[in-house]
């Protein structure tokens, strides 16, 4: 189902993604972080839905449909390295920084920091081209909320 999308995303010269494709790719990355510790629970799902509704100004139903598509895409997407590099080439830095903030929101949704989630966020930050300092500041902002 997502073969053409993934091909476009991981092409050797990725183009800037249309808004709908970018939000799908970024939401799939949120799903990837939520699944990284082996538990994709209701709290994490609700956090992703809230992020999608707020970030993209979606209704509850539209956010649910986006999450469903993102879950499928995440399952079919290549490894995190290629996936995040492709997003980096197609999405502006400020948007990528907001993605790191959203990743921290999802990772901290259950009130615990998990080593596997930390590792994926560090790797995603690196491959998204977000500095360690910006990622740490994003985490601190999310821990305060």
Image: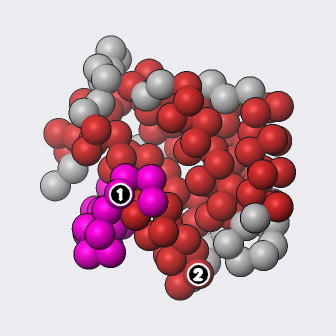
- Region of the chain picked out in magenta, as a range: 54-76
Closer to the camera, 44 or 115? Answer: 44
Quadrant where the C terminus sits is bottom right
Residue occupying the point 17% across, 39% down: 4
User: Would residue 20 appear left or right of 81 to someone viewing this image?
Assistant: left
Local SS, label 2: helix
Q: Residue at x 62, y 54 (%)?
A: 103
Q: Nearer the viewer, residue 60 or 115?
A: 60
Q: CA distance from mark 1 to mark 2?
A: 20 Å
**Residue at the outermost bottom position:** 42
Label 2: few (<14), some (14–19) or many (≥20) C-alpha neighbours in 10 Å? some
Return the residue found at the far top.
Answer: 13
Q: Is residue 7 magenta?
A: no
Q: Looking at the image, is 79 positioned above or below residue 27?
A: above
State the residue at coordinates (65%, 48%).
101
Tell me where residue 111 sits by quadrant: bottom right
Residue 123 seen in this snapshot: yes
72 part of magenta stretch: yes
In which quarter of the view is residue 17 placed? Answer: top left
Q: Which residue is mark 2?
A: 43
Q: Nearer the viewer, mark 1 or mark 2?
A: 1
On screen, residue 27 versus residue 115, left or right, reads left
Q: Quadrant of the N terminus?
A: bottom left
**Classed neighbour count for the residue bearing mark 1: other residues with Cα under 10 Å, few (<14), some (14–19), many (≥20):** few
Residue 57's label in the rendered image is 1
Asked if residue 117 shows in the view, the reply is: no
Q: Main secondary structure of the magenta part?
A: helix
């Amino acid at each position: 189902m997502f073969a053409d999308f993934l091909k476009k995303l991981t092409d050797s010269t990725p183009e800037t993604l249309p808004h709908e494709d970018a939000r799908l790719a970024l939401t799939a990355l949120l799903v990837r972080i939520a699944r990284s510790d082996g538990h994709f629970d209701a709290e994490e799902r609700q956090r992703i839905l809230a992020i999608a509704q707020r970030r993209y100004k979606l209704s509850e139903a539209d956010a649910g449909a986006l999450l469903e598509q993102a879950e499928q895409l995440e399952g079919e997407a290549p490894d995190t390295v290629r996936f995040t590099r492709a997003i980096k080439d197609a999405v502006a830095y400020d948007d990528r920084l907001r993605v790191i903030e959203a990743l921290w929101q999802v990772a901290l949704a259950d009130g615990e920091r998990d080593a596997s989630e930390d590792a994926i966020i560090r790797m995603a930050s690196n491959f998204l081209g977000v500095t360690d300092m910006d990622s740490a500041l994003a985490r601190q902002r999310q821990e305060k909320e």
